[in-house]
Image (tube, helix red, strand yellow):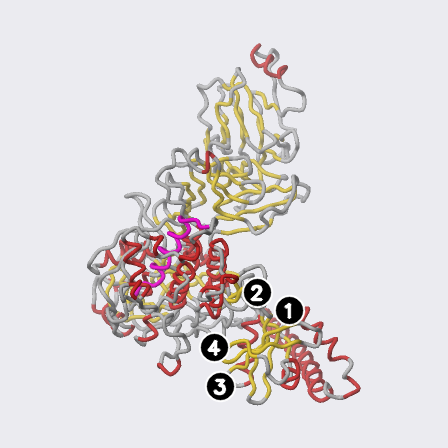
């Protein structure tokens, strides 16, 4: 128990207050004190339900203790600060709650000396309050959050969660932002409402984070974030939202009777390296298996603190002290992240970007992007910049150093006299022996399978093995004869496309399948199997599932689940009234397709670019759910150069849906799929091919005519006339879909949103400005080294020139991050995760 030295005679107001509360209440009288360490260790002030307590917890620093409110005795949800072992937390007679060090130095004070505090209490919700003689709360921990909010606690506009240099804030517009040093925004969840009066944020018991305001849904809330255990749990599940010291915002949950064991169920940034400043200045963030690691760019730099590599690096020799001429060090697949105000931008190739910075005395580093924009970003002296290195990053960075360049050594065990290296070598030998034995067993099993699986004595095992393999979700390997048999010698043709013809088939277990006979596939056996493994590992509600494959001789076939309703084009362009899709179905198909493509682009291990998005490759199941097919059949983005072979003979897409960069022999990225999707989106709304030209469209290409009508405010003219009597038509959804489609079909890839952003635009989460007029192919001008000079912004204004500041602002806003005030700075060009708002 806490030491509570009562005076001999209690003041009458305090006596009345104590009599007013039932004995189950947790009343902490004036004079109560908690000590950090010593004979009174393990003391605490507890809530009536014993779930929360105020106590000292061991800190990460030796011989220091954290004064905190904690859940289950070890999960801090609020803290006053850290003190030494002789520190204490005391409720003084003056009414002030004060944390002091062993030297009696004040570390933290509630500032309630003049508010008439007579007692304190910790409630069952975890809220610690100070009360006056009239039982009115004059101070509470919920109103002064530190790095965490819990269920039933609200965070209002202007309040911050803070952890080191990082802060989390709800802005007046309803936007949620993560900032570094109170200025640089590196994550932004947008609501973008100008009509909010006094928004507040709360974590619901179901795992959703909601924004509340009297102007939202009749005073209700707008759910903006969902944990992955949304809707699960019960009254014994405790959830909290915390800004961790690594700069990431996470939702945690724990069972009340789970001894304080917590599990993360959502994080603002899935890639920790995208947290601005995570590895400090000059630090390069990369991943070692599943964990982020910080390192210096080369041996021309030293780690500032070897015990904490997140503090960054420093030059061994400053550029001003070079005894020899400076040179540029190359970092492949690396992007340096800085404030946009510290950057200047130009158009240059990799070698020019490197040499221009070397010749420029006011440039200390540069970044050459390989995303088709041709941008070269130069970093100025005094800039704080950190880096992200990954094989999928489409950028090369150059840092100016005093020569010669000293590359980092590979990480190998050091030899020494302490015997550690010998033990490591023995461990490696042991592992090698075990791996070798396992490898021999695998080889023997494979030889048995190849030699004996066709033997009649093993024939009875084949159907059971196939059924087991199918049930496990792994791709089943079929022989060519099996697929000939199940398709009745490829008799019933379902359709065809750029990759081959599709036939209907029935497996031995009576499962109806679609068998695609691939054409023009030149990969060898090993490469084909690797690509099949990649396709089969993608599982999403809006993707067609791969059941199996055949790779036998020159035959290459894929076996997919069967969709009875066929493809979307049979619904959109069919005059049969029985197949007319209602507006509700159309909107859900458009949204589902966008989510499926988003999964391919942003949630797979490697970005999968479809290259042939069109209605014929969007299948519809019995519940009218969209299923994207033929994904992964185009070559996966090469992580080494992020480009395809763009010879015209290799173009597999369909005219009318091909992005301009295909035809201009420019880099092909995931933004090419965005263009194709935009054309499909327009067709879903209108029920007409995007390239139709008729008298009704004034002899213009339909997409151009549709924009003219949209610009006039006549969105109804774009809508399929067959939906005139459809009661499910929502004109606000129609307007959003049409507006989104025009953003998607912009000429420049950089102007198009990511598919993750498209989903938000369709759902109405992201507000949109008017898109620029899409150009026809005859209007578009492309070259290998330059792009047009008119660049609109999806979420902000644009300028007619390509100055460094306007370009940076345009690109930054295009990726969905807007400035929230004059004190804010924004991060420079490019984005790896558009929906998360990190711009590199």
Relative vertical location of residue 437 with respect to residue 682 in this rendering, above or below: below
**Residue 731 on the magenta span:** yes
Relative vertical location of residue 282 with respect to residue 93 in this rendering, above or below: below
SS assignment for the magenta stretch, majority: helix
User: On the picture, is 671 further left or further right than 401?
Assistant: right
Circle 3 residue: 522
Circle 2 residue: 539
Considering only order in the chain, which callout, 4 or 3, is on the residue closer to the N terminus?
4
Considering only order in the chain, which callout, 2 or 3, is on the residue closer to the N terminus?
3
Circle number at residue 497: 4
Q: Which residues are magenta?
A: 729-747
For numbered disc 4, what is the local secondary structure? strand
Relative vertical location of residue 522 with respect to residue 145 in this rendering, above or below: below
Given this view, does label 3 or label 4 mark the residue nearer the observer? 4
Residue at x 66% of width, y 20% of height: 22
Residue at x 47% of width, y 42% of height: 222
For numbered disc 3, what is the local secondary structure? loop
């Amino acid at each position: 128990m806490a030491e509570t030295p009562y005076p001999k005679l209690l003041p009458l107001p305090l006596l009345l207050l104590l009599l007013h509360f039932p004995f189950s209440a947790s009343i902490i009288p004036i004079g109560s004190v908690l000590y950090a360490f010593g004979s009174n260790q393990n003391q605490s002030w507890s809530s009536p339900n014993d779930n929360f307590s105020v106590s000292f917890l061991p800190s990460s620093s030796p011989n220091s203790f954290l004064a905190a409110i904690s859940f289950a005795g070890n999960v801090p949800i609020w803290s006053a600060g850290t003190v030494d072992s002789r520190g204490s937390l005391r409720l003084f007679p003056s009414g002030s709650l004060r944390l002091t060090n062993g030297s009696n130095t004040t570390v933290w004070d509630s500032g309630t000396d003049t508010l008439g505090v007579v007692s304190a209490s910790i409630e069952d919700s975890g809220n610690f309050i100070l009360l006056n003689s009239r039982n009115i709360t004059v101070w509470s921990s919920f109103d002064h959050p530190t790095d965490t909010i819990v269920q039933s606690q609200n965070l209002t506009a202007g309040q911050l969660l803070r952890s080191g240099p990082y802060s989390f804030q709800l802005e007046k517009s309803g936007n949620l932002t993560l900032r570094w040093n109170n200025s640089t925004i590196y994550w932004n969840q947008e609501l973008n409402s100008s009509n909010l009066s006094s928004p507040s944020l709360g974590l619901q018991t179901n795992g959703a984070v909601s924004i509340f305001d009297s102007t939202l849904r009749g005073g209700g809330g707008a759910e903006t974030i969902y944990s992955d255990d949304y809707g699960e749990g019960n009254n014994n599940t405790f959830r909290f939202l915390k800004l961790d010291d690594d700069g990431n915002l996470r939702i945690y949950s724990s069972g009340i009777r789970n001894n304080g064991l917590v599990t993360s169920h959502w994080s603002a940034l899935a890639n920790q390296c995208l947290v601005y400043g995570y590895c400090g200045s000059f630090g390069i963030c990369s991943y070692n298996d599943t964990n982020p690691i910080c390192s210096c760019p080369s041996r021309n730099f030293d780690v500032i603190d070897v015990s904490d590599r997140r503090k960054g690096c420093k030059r061994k020799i400053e550029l001003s002290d070079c005894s020899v001429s400076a040179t540029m060090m190359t970092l492949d697949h690396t992007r340096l992240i800085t404030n946009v105000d510290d950057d200047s931008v130009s158009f240059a190739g990799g070698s020019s970007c490197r040499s221009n910075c070397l010749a420029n005395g006011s440039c200390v580093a540069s970044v050459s992007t390989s995303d088709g924009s041709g941008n070269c970003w130069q970093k100025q002296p005094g800039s704080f910049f950190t880096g992200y290195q990954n094989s999928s990053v489409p950028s090369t960075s150059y840092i100016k150093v005093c020569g010669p360049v000293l590359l980092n050594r590979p990480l190998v065990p050091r030899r020494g006299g302490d015997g550690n290296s010998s033990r490591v070598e023995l461990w490696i030998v042991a592992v090698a022996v075990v791996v070798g034995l396992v490898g021999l067993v695998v080889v023997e099993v494979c030889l048995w399978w190849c030699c004996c699986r066709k033997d009649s004595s093993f024939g009875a095992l084949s159907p059971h093995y196939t059924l087991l393999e199918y049930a496990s979700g792994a791709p089943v390997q079929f022989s060519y004869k099996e697929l000939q048999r199940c398709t009745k010698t490829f008799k019933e043709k379902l359709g065809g496309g750029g990759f081959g013809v599709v036939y209907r088939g029935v497996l031995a277990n009576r499962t109806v399948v679609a068998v695609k006979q691939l054409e023009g596939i030149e990969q060898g056996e090993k490469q084909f199997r690797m690509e099949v493994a990649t396709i089969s590992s993608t599982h999403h509600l809006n993707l067609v599932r791969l059941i199996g494959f055949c790779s036998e001789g020159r035959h290459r076939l894929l076996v997919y689940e069967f969709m009875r309703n066929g493809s979307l084009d049979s619904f959109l362009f069919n005059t049969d009234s029985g197949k007319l899709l209602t507006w509700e179905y159309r909107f859900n198909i458009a949204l589902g397709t966008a989510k499926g493509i988003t999964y391919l682009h942003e949630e797979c291990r490697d970005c999968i670019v479809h290259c042939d998005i069109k209605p014929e490759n969007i299948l519809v199941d019995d519940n009218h759910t969209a299923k994207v097919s033929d994904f992964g059949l185009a070559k996966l983005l090469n992580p080494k150069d992020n480009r395809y072979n763009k010879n015209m003979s290799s173009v597999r897409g369909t005219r009318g849906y091909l992005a301009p960069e295909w035809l201009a022999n420019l880099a092909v990225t995931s933004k090419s799929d965005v263009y194709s999707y935009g054309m499909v989106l327009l067709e879903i709304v209108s029920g007409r091919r995007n390239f139709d030209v008729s008298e009704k469209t004034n002899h213009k290409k339909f997409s151009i005519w549709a924009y003219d009508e949209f610009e006039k405010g006549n969105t109804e003219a774009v809508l399929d006339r067959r939906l005139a009597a459809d009661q499910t038509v929502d004109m606000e959804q129609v307007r959003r879909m049409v507006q989104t489609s025009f953003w998607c079909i912009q000429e420049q890839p950089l102007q198009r949103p990511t598919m993750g952003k498209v989903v938000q635009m369709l759902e109405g989460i992201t507000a949109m400005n008017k898109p620029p007029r899409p150009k026809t192919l005859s209007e578009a001008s492309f070259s290998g080294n330059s792009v047009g000079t008119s660049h609109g912004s999806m979420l902000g204004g644009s300028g007619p020139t390509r100055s460094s500041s306007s370009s940076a602002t345009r690109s930054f806003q295009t990726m969905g991050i807007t400035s929230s005030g004059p004190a804010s700075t924004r991060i420079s060009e490019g984005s790896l995760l558009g929906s998360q708002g990190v711009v590199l």
